[in-house]
Amino acid sequence: MTKPITTTLNAVRPYLKAHWKQLLKHLGKTKTDDEPLRFSTIAEAVGVHTAYRCLDSLSQEHNPLIWKLKDDATDRVLHIFEKKFPGDTRFKEAVQATRDYADGKITKKQFDGVQTSWTEPNDVAKTCWDNQEKTHGELLIQRFG
């Protein structure tokens, strides 16, 4: 693993509504600050799912790393959707759209259109996302420290 990518309490506060006091207690703090904060520390305090959500606190310079992380995690759960819906390519197309958007090959509007086309309120989509989020959290700790 390379040098850990860090965030700060000030940056993650909007993403930790329900877990804010828990993180402060874990850190032995009572207020926000701008000291470097590792994602593994957030995960220890409030869990990997919440630490994953805190990725949004990073600056845009980290977007390529975040997109690669999301790509890898999504690839690991693609089989769940494909097993339940053989021949349905919407999830796979959404994964490709993520790659294309990260590489600047499609616009945000095109990306959003592909994402919306497969997101439906069904058990399979929820299962995929739940498994994907768990995988994201594990990869987050491995790659971001």
Image: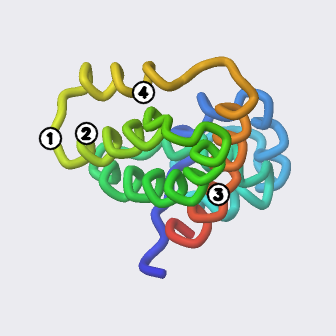
Confirm whether residue 33 shows in the render.
no
Residue at (30% x, 54% y) in the render: 64
Disc 2 from disc 3: Cα separation:
21 Å
Mark 4: amino acid: Gln
Q: Position of residue 124 (x, y in %)?
A: 70, 34
Circle 2 — which element?
helix
Disc 2 from disc 4: Cα separation:
11 Å
Say which residue label 1 marks: 105
In the drawing, what numbered circle is on residue 101?
2
Residue at (30% x, 48% y) in the render: 99
Say which residue label 3 marks: 135
Asked if residue 132 lies left or right of residue 4, the reply is right
Quadrant of the rendering where the C terminus is positioned: bottom right
The correct choice, above or below, for 122 with respect to 16 in the image is above
The correct choice, above or below, for 80 with respect to 56 in the image is below
Q: Are marks 1 and 2 in contact (CB under 8 Å)?
A: yes
Front in this rendered view, residue 99 or 57: 99
Say which residue label 4 marks: 115
Q: Earlier in the sequence, mark 2 or mark 3?
A: 2
Residue at (55% x, 51% y) in the render: 78
In the drawing, what numbered circle is on residue 128?
none
